[in-house]
Image: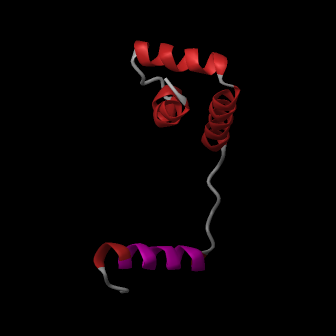
């Protein structure tokens, strides 16, 4: 496994969804690659922070613009 493989498999690794063989290979790479260790640790911490955070209420004007943009992208119409 190389650094690109780690990035490609990172989500599945953090979610515990890698096969035992792929997990072993990834963890073996992490033992020798400081850069990938940092990426995995930072990503794990980011996920934990966002999972523990509370939603931030959007101001009404932002909600309206977001709905309008979503509607326009979904239907091709502004209304």
Of all residues, the one furthest to the front in this rendering is 2
Which percent across, then down, holds residue 31?
A: 64, 16
Corner quadrant of residue 76: bottom left
Q: Is residue 48 magenta?
A: no
Corner quadrant of residue 43: top right
Q: How many marks?
A: 0
Q: Is residue 71 left or right of residue 13?
A: left
Image point 45% across, 30% down: which residue? 12
Image point 37% across, 86% down: which residue? 78
Q: Is residue 66 magenta?
A: yes
Against 78, residue 22 (above or below) is above
Against 70, residue 13 (above or below) is above
Which percent across, then down, holds residue 69?
A: 44, 77
Q: Is residue 30 left or right of residue 19?
A: right
Q: Nearer the viewer, residue 68 or 42?
A: 42
**Residue bounds of the magenta highlight:** 61-72
Image point 56% across, 17% down: which residue? 27
Which percent across, then down, holds residue 3?
A: 55, 31
Image quadrant in which the C terminus is located? bottom left
Which percent across, then down, holds residue 45?
A: 68, 35
Image point 48% across, 31% down: which residue? 5
Of all residues, the one furthest to the left in this rendering is 75
Q: Nearer the viewer, residue 43 or 7?
A: 7
Mostly what secondary structure, the magenta segment?
helix
- Give the color scheme: rainbow, by chain, secondary structure or one colour: secondary structure
């Amino acid at each position: 496994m190389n650094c690109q493989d780690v990035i490609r498999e990172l989500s599945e690794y953090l979610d515990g969804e890698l096969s035992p063989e792929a997990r072993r290979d990834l963890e073996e790479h992490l033992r020798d690659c400081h850069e990938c260790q940092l990426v995995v640790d930072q990503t794990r911490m980011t996920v934990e922070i966002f999972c523990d955070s509370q939603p931030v209420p959007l101001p009404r004007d932002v909600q309206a613009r977001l709905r309008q943009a979503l509607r326009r992208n979904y239907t091709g119409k502004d209304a």
